[in-house]
Amino acid sequence: MKFSYYLNELNYFVIHNNKIPSKRSKNTYEAKLGYWCCRKRYMYKKNILNRHQMDKLNQIPNWYWSYRESKYFDIMFNKVKIFIETNKRIPTKWSDNCDEKKLGSWCSYIRRIKNKISDDKKKLFDNIQGWTWEFKQTDISLNIKKLKDFIILNKRLPCIKTNDELEYDLAMWYIGQKEKEEFDQISNFALKKIRRIKSFYEETTGKKYDEDHLLN
Protein backbone atom coordinates (compact mmCIF):
# COMPACT_ATOMS: atom_id res chain seq x y z
CA MET A 1 0.00 0.00 0.00
CA LYS A 2 1.00 3.62 -0.41
CA PHE A 3 3.20 5.45 2.09
CA SER A 4 0.45 8.01 2.76
CA TYR A 5 -1.95 5.26 3.84
CA TYR A 6 0.44 3.80 6.44
CA LEU A 7 1.48 7.25 7.57
CA ASN A 8 -2.12 8.18 8.33
CA GLU A 9 -2.67 4.86 10.12
CA LEU A 10 0.48 5.40 12.16
CA ASN A 11 -0.47 8.94 13.09
CA TYR A 12 -3.93 7.77 14.19
CA PHE A 13 -2.43 4.94 16.27
CA VAL A 14 0.10 7.19 18.03
CA ILE A 15 -2.44 9.88 18.85
CA HIS A 16 -4.80 7.35 20.44
CA ASN A 17 -2.20 5.17 22.13
CA ASN A 18 0.57 7.67 22.92
CA LYS A 19 3.30 5.30 21.68
CA ILE A 20 4.94 3.97 18.52
CA PRO A 21 3.48 0.58 17.50
CA SER A 22 5.55 -2.54 18.23
CA LYS A 23 6.08 -5.37 15.76
CA ARG A 24 6.07 -7.74 18.75
CA SER A 25 2.55 -6.79 19.76
CA LYS A 26 -0.04 -9.58 20.02
CA ASN A 27 -2.46 -7.21 18.37
CA THR A 28 -2.35 -7.91 14.63
CA TYR A 29 -3.07 -4.32 13.63
CA GLU A 30 -0.34 -2.88 15.87
CA ALA A 31 2.17 -5.55 14.81
CA LYS A 32 1.54 -4.75 11.14
CA LEU A 33 2.19 -1.05 11.73
CA GLY A 34 5.22 -1.94 13.84
CA TYR A 35 6.75 -3.99 11.01
CA TRP A 36 6.15 -1.08 8.61
CA CYS A 37 7.94 1.29 11.02
CA CYS A 38 10.88 -1.12 11.29
CA ARG A 39 11.11 -1.27 7.53
CA LYS A 40 11.28 2.52 7.31
CA ARG A 41 13.99 2.64 9.98
CA TYR A 42 15.98 0.04 8.05
CA MET A 43 15.68 2.11 4.86
CA TYR A 44 16.78 5.19 6.81
CA LYS A 45 19.81 3.33 8.17
CA LYS A 46 20.76 2.19 4.66
CA ASN A 47 20.32 5.72 3.27
CA ILE A 48 17.59 4.67 0.85
CA LEU A 49 14.68 6.52 2.46
CA ASN A 50 13.76 9.66 0.56
CA ARG A 51 13.68 13.07 2.22
CA HIS A 52 9.92 13.48 1.87
CA GLN A 53 9.22 10.32 3.87
CA MET A 54 11.86 11.21 6.47
CA ASP A 55 10.29 14.63 7.04
CA LYS A 56 6.79 13.15 7.32
CA LEU A 57 7.89 10.50 9.83
CA ASN A 58 9.75 13.10 11.91
CA GLN A 59 6.43 14.89 12.37
CA ILE A 60 4.90 11.84 14.06
CA PRO A 61 4.76 12.33 17.87
CA ASN A 62 7.33 10.15 19.71
CA TRP A 63 8.87 8.94 16.45
CA TYR A 64 12.45 7.64 16.71
CA TRP A 65 14.96 6.24 14.23
CA SER A 66 16.66 3.77 16.54
CA TYR A 67 15.56 1.74 19.56
CA ARG A 68 18.63 2.87 21.47
CA GLU A 69 17.83 6.53 20.79
CA SER A 70 14.29 6.13 22.13
CA LYS A 71 15.15 4.15 25.25
CA TYR A 72 18.20 6.25 26.17
CA PHE A 73 16.19 9.46 25.96
CA ASP A 74 13.43 8.02 28.16
CA ILE A 75 15.93 6.80 30.75
CA MET A 76 17.89 10.06 30.91
CA PHE A 77 14.81 12.26 30.86
CA ASN A 78 13.26 10.40 33.82
CA LYS A 79 16.52 10.64 35.78
CA VAL A 80 16.78 14.38 35.11
CA LYS A 81 13.13 14.90 36.05
CA ILE A 82 13.61 13.08 39.37
CA PHE A 83 16.84 14.98 40.07
CA ILE A 84 15.22 18.38 39.51
CA GLU A 85 12.14 17.50 41.57
CA THR A 86 14.33 16.23 44.42
CA ASN A 87 17.08 18.88 44.42
CA LYS A 88 15.08 21.87 43.13
CA ARG A 89 17.76 22.60 40.53
CA ILE A 90 19.09 21.39 37.19
CA PRO A 91 22.04 18.96 37.38
CA THR A 92 25.39 20.40 36.30
CA LYS A 93 28.16 18.74 34.34
CA TRP A 94 30.68 20.53 36.58
CA SER A 95 29.57 18.56 39.65
CA ASP A 96 32.08 16.39 41.52
CA ASN A 97 29.37 13.74 41.74
CA CYS A 98 29.72 11.32 38.81
CA ASP A 99 25.99 10.65 38.49
CA GLU A 100 25.07 14.34 38.50
CA LYS A 101 27.91 15.13 36.10
CA LYS A 102 26.50 12.62 33.60
CA LEU A 103 23.00 14.08 33.89
CA GLY A 104 24.38 17.62 33.61
CA SER A 105 26.30 16.77 30.44
CA TRP A 106 23.15 15.33 28.93
CA CYS A 107 21.16 18.46 29.86
CA SER A 108 23.80 20.62 28.15
CA TYR A 109 23.55 18.42 25.07
CA ILE A 110 19.75 18.73 25.02
CA ARG A 111 20.02 22.51 25.30
CA ARG A 112 22.46 22.60 22.37
CA ILE A 113 20.15 20.58 20.09
CA LYS A 114 16.95 22.30 21.22
CA ASN A 115 16.10 23.35 17.66
CA LYS A 116 16.57 19.80 16.38
CA ILE A 117 14.39 17.85 18.82
CA SER A 118 10.66 17.35 18.40
CA ASP A 119 8.07 19.67 19.92
CA ASP A 120 6.79 16.73 21.98
CA LYS A 121 10.16 16.31 23.67
CA LYS A 122 10.45 20.05 24.25
CA LYS A 123 7.08 20.00 26.00
CA LEU A 124 8.28 17.22 28.30
CA PHE A 125 11.06 19.51 29.55
CA ASP A 126 8.83 22.57 29.67
CA ASN A 127 6.50 20.67 32.01
CA ILE A 128 9.27 20.13 34.57
CA GLN A 129 9.05 22.84 37.22
CA GLY A 130 12.51 24.40 37.44
CA TRP A 131 13.70 23.47 33.95
CA THR A 132 15.11 26.24 31.80
CA TRP A 133 16.59 26.27 28.32
CA GLU A 134 18.98 29.05 29.31
CA PHE A 135 21.74 29.17 31.90
CA LYS A 136 20.69 30.61 35.25
CA GLN A 137 22.83 32.87 37.42
CA THR A 138 23.74 29.86 39.57
CA ASP A 139 25.05 28.08 36.46
CA ILE A 140 27.12 31.12 35.48
CA SER A 141 28.59 31.47 38.96
CA LEU A 142 29.47 27.78 39.04
CA ASN A 143 31.12 27.93 35.62
CA ILE A 144 33.10 31.02 36.62
CA LYS A 145 34.31 29.17 39.71
CA LYS A 146 35.35 26.18 37.57
CA LEU A 147 37.17 28.54 35.19
CA LYS A 148 39.05 30.19 38.05
CA ASP A 149 39.93 26.83 39.57
CA PHE A 150 41.28 25.74 36.17
CA ILE A 151 43.42 28.89 35.88
CA ILE A 152 44.80 28.44 39.39
CA LEU A 153 45.66 24.78 38.77
CA ASN A 154 47.03 25.05 35.23
CA LYS A 155 48.26 28.67 35.06
CA ARG A 156 46.53 29.09 31.71
CA LEU A 157 43.14 29.41 30.06
CA PRO A 158 41.31 26.23 28.98
CA CYS A 159 41.81 25.34 25.31
CA ILE A 160 39.47 23.80 22.78
CA LYS A 161 42.37 21.76 21.32
CA THR A 162 42.33 19.22 24.10
CA ASN A 163 41.32 15.61 24.59
CA ASP A 164 39.86 16.45 28.00
CA GLU A 165 36.09 16.78 27.65
CA LEU A 166 35.62 19.05 30.67
CA GLU A 167 38.38 21.43 29.57
CA TYR A 168 36.89 21.58 26.08
CA ASP A 169 33.39 22.31 27.44
CA LEU A 170 34.78 25.00 29.74
CA ALA A 171 36.68 26.66 26.89
CA MET A 172 33.61 26.55 24.62
CA TRP A 173 31.43 28.00 27.37
CA TYR A 174 33.85 30.88 27.98
CA ILE A 175 34.17 31.57 24.23
CA GLY A 176 30.38 31.60 24.01
CA GLN A 177 30.17 34.17 26.80
CA LYS A 178 32.76 36.39 25.10
CA GLU A 179 30.77 36.21 21.85
CA LYS A 180 27.61 37.20 23.68
CA GLU A 181 29.49 40.14 25.19
CA GLU A 182 30.67 41.23 21.73
CA PHE A 183 27.13 41.24 20.34
CA ASP A 184 25.60 42.73 23.49
CA GLN A 185 23.59 39.57 24.20
CA ILE A 186 24.85 38.91 27.71
CA SER A 187 23.14 39.68 31.03
CA ASN A 188 24.60 42.32 33.34
CA PHE A 189 25.21 39.64 35.96
CA ALA A 190 27.24 37.49 33.57
CA LEU A 191 29.01 40.50 32.06
CA LYS A 192 30.43 41.60 35.43
CA LYS A 193 31.66 38.06 36.14
CA ILE A 194 33.26 37.63 32.72
CA ARG A 195 35.06 40.99 32.73
CA ARG A 196 36.78 40.13 36.01
CA ILE A 197 38.47 37.09 34.50
CA LYS A 198 41.17 39.13 32.74
CA SER A 199 42.50 40.73 35.93
CA PHE A 200 42.09 37.47 37.85
CA TYR A 201 44.12 35.63 35.20
CA GLU A 202 46.96 38.17 35.18
CA GLU A 203 47.11 38.34 38.99
CA THR A 204 47.07 34.55 39.30
CA THR A 205 49.50 33.60 36.53
CA GLY A 206 51.70 36.70 36.30
CA LYS A 207 51.22 36.51 32.53
CA LYS A 208 49.51 38.81 30.06
CA TYR A 209 45.92 37.82 29.31
CA ASP A 210 45.56 36.50 25.75
CA GLU A 211 42.28 35.01 24.50
CA ASP A 212 44.11 33.31 21.62
CA HIS A 213 45.16 30.71 24.19
CA LEU A 214 41.55 29.47 24.13
CA LEU A 215 42.10 28.31 20.56
CA ASN A 216 45.72 27.11 20.66
Image: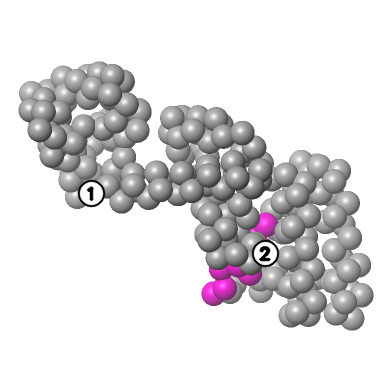
Which residue is located at x 21 percent, y 42 percent?
A: 41
Q: From the viewer's perspective, tell me whether residue 26 is left or right of residue 172.
A: left
Label 2 CA crowd tier, 10 Å (few <14, some 14–19, many 20+): many
Quarter of the image containing the N terminus?
top left
Could you say which disc has been placed on residue 171 in the image? 2
Give the image quarter of residue 188.
top right
State the image coordinates of residue 12 (x, y, percent, origin top left).
25, 18
Which stretch is magenta?
Answer: 163-173
Q: Which residue is mark 1?
A: 45
The correct choice, above or below, for 115 with respect to 100 in the image is above
The amino acid pointed to by label 1 is Lys
State the image coordinates of residue 43 (x, y, percent, origin top left).
18, 43
Q: From the viewer's perspective, tell me whether residue 186 is left or right of residue 196.
A: left
Q: From the viewer's perspective, tell me whether residue 97 is left or right of residue 115.
A: right
Q: Is residue 171 magenta?
A: yes
Q: Nearer the viewer, residue 143 or 188?
A: 143
User: Is tag 1's residue or tag 2's residue first in the polypeptide sequence?
Assistant: 1
Which residue is located at x 85 percent, y 55 percent?
A: 193
